[in-house]
Amino acid sequence: MGMRFTVVAKDAGTRARAGILHTAHGDVETPVFMPVGTAGTVKAMTQTMLEELGAQIILANTYHLCMRPGHEMVREFGGLHRFISWPHAILTDSGGFQVMSLKGLGKVTDDGVWFRSHLDGSPHFFSPESVMEFQLSLGADIIMPLDECVDYPASHETLKRSVRLTGRWAERSKKYFEANVAASREPDGSGHAKANNGPSLFGIVQGGTDLDLRRESALEISEIGFDGYAIGGLSVGEPKEELYGVTEHVAGWLPEDRPRYLMGVGTPEDLVRCVALGIDMFDCVMPTRNARNGSVFTSEGKLVIKSARYAHDPGPIDPACSCIVCRRYSRAYIRHLFAVGEISASVLATFHNLWFYLDMMRRVRQAIYFGGFGKLLGGVLGGPGLTSQSA
């Protein structure tokens, strides 16, 4: 295993837990939110800003990096960490979700996925093995196997096919991974590979909102054996009750001693509620995408800072927030930046939104450490929002 996971604290009343992911590029405290850096950059942010925000790990997308600049070029630079100048942990997804989203441009077979680039229409093929090769070239700390994520709603037969295919691809991915990674890891002195040397491979559970198929997928992926486990195929339009219900069941079926990653979720409330269900890792484009559209998260809920109602508002985005944006700039000024089309509008709004998410996760971890998670969860479920308190 290229990564170790240590659970250091548990909440008495829920499944919430705090832990540490020990990776080759530093320790990552969990529960953790991973900002999405699709093409090797978190939109509107520099790496220095991400470090100021306290980001421990970011996500990059294999599909987009393979289209531009190409995994071969990234490998020439010594891997993604050097190419983007990010010395901390990186997770790369398989690109499967993006390929499946290319409506009319892709075709799924047992061997893999044929598709045409959204850039120029050029033909490409992703197989479980090639996706492993691409991600090993990128040099991420955590990599994901190719899986099939289907739309919501989907028929039982469609979901069943997806589960079967995801399982077969998972086996092929692990076989390729082990053949191409294990021999390259440095020994620890006893003849065994160092636990945090090189990348780790996570398995992905599919099955939509069908609990029987989800259980089948979870048991199959667990049997294959991975360094961590992800729940895919959620936050694609299903009701919140089903999102939480599926997450609760699947988390309970996955190995206790491995990190659990809920892919593509979600709102601040989603994150806190799913931590309570036993999830350790999250990613979502929501804080960055919303920021670029002028929507910001506050302790009283979301507000659209572009609205004319804030044109003369001298207060900060969120009076309860201690980020540099809220300490320095007024709602009126940020609203003005959006009104005149200044790039800095997206920069400031994105910085605030990422601070809100990352600070929230810091407080979640602290609450688990010191026995206050139940109170925090109750405030989220019964209150107007989340308060940002970090200095």
Image (cartoon, rainbow, N blue to C red):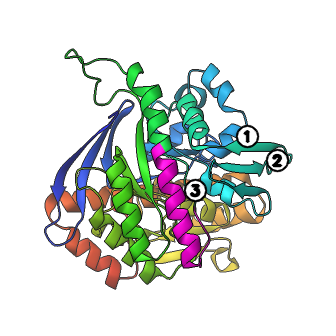
Identify the amino acid type marked 1: Met
Q: Position of residue 83 (x, y in %)?
A: 60, 27
- Which residue is the site of mark 1? 67
Secondary structure at badge 1 equals: helix
Identity of the residue drawn at 54% across and 71% down: 159
Identity of the residue drawn at 45% across and 28% down: 179
- Specify few, some or many for label 1: CA neighbours under 10 Å numbering under 14, 14-19, or 20 or more: some
Contact between marks 3 and 1 (CB within 8 A): the answer is no
Marks 3 and 1, how far apart in space?
Answer: 26 Å
Residue 59 relative to residue 338: left or right: left
Identify the amino acid type marked 3: Thr
Identity of the residue drawn at 79% across and 57% down: 105
Contact between marks 2 and 1 (CB within 8 A): the answer is yes
- Residue span colored magenta: 149-171
Name which of mark 2 and mark 1 comes first in the sequence.
1
Marks 2 and 1, how far apart in space?
Answer: 8 Å
- Which residue is the site of mark 2? 119
- Which residue is the site of mark 3? 350
Identify the amino acid type marked 2: Leu
Identity of the residue drawn at 18% across and 67% down: 372
Instruction: Assign the magenta stretch its main secondary structure.
Output: helix
Residues 122 and 350: in front is 122
Name which of mark 3 and mark 1 comes first in the sequence.
1
Marks 3 and 2, how far apart in space?
Answer: 26 Å
Which residue sits furthest top? 189
Instruction: Let me know if residue 10 is in the magenta part.
Output: no
Q: Is residue 251 above or below residue 257?
A: below
Q: In which quadrant of the rendered view does residue 363 lie?
A: bottom left
Select label 3 or label 1 by which is in front.
Answer: 1
Q: In which quadrant of the rendered view does residue 366 lie?
A: bottom left
